[in-house]
Image (tube, rainbow, N blue to C red):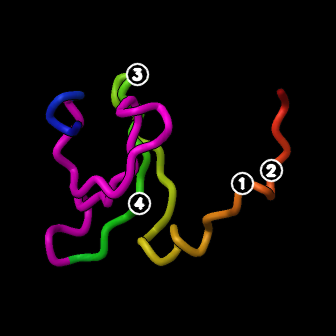
Amino acid sequence: MIEEWGYPAIGVAICDTPTAGHDMVFLDYRECGPQGEPKVVHIAQEFDYEVTFLANNFEEFIRGLMNEDDFEFEE
């Protein structure tokens, strides 16, 4: 999907979202280089590949995940 949707070459895609390719979560190696610890970012394809910071590293990202039961959804 990275090539198909034209995502920037900033690192490694670690997951997609329910939008089926229109946004993805990446390990961002732009600042740390190939040997450093990457940040975790979200890239929105439909918003001109806008990059949104999620976490300073993968561990912080995982520890910040929440169960969907923690949210209230409107129907």
Q: For numbered disc 1, what is the local secondary structure?
A: helix
Sequence-wise first label, 2 or 4: 4
Q: Which residues are magenta?
A: 6-35
Describe the element under mark 3 as helix, strand or loop.
helix
Q: Which quadrant of the figure has residue 6?
A: top left
- Dot 2, crowdedness within 10 Å: few (<14), some or many (≥20)? few
Query: Given this view, does label 3 or label 1 mark the residue nearer the observer?
Result: 1
Residue located beneath label 4 in the image = 40
Question: On the image, which quarter does residue 74 sit in?
Answer: top right
Q: Determine whether label 3 and label 2 are within 8 Å by CB.
A: no
Mark 3 vs mark 2, CA separation in Å: 25 Å
Residue in view at x 81 percent, y 38 percent: 73
Q: CA distance from mark 4 to mark 3?
A: 19 Å
Left or right, residue 26 beside residue 62: left
Q: What is the secondary structure assignment of the residue under circle 2?
A: loop
Residue 68: image tag: 1
Q: Nearer the viewer, mark 3 or mark 2?
A: 2
Residue 22, position in %: x, y?
A: 39, 29
Q: Is residue 11 magenta?
A: yes
Q: Nearer the viewer, residue 27 or 29?
A: 27
Determine which residue is flagged by label 2.
71
Quadrant assignment for the N terminus: top left
Q: How many marks?
A: 4
For the C terminus, which image quadrant? top right
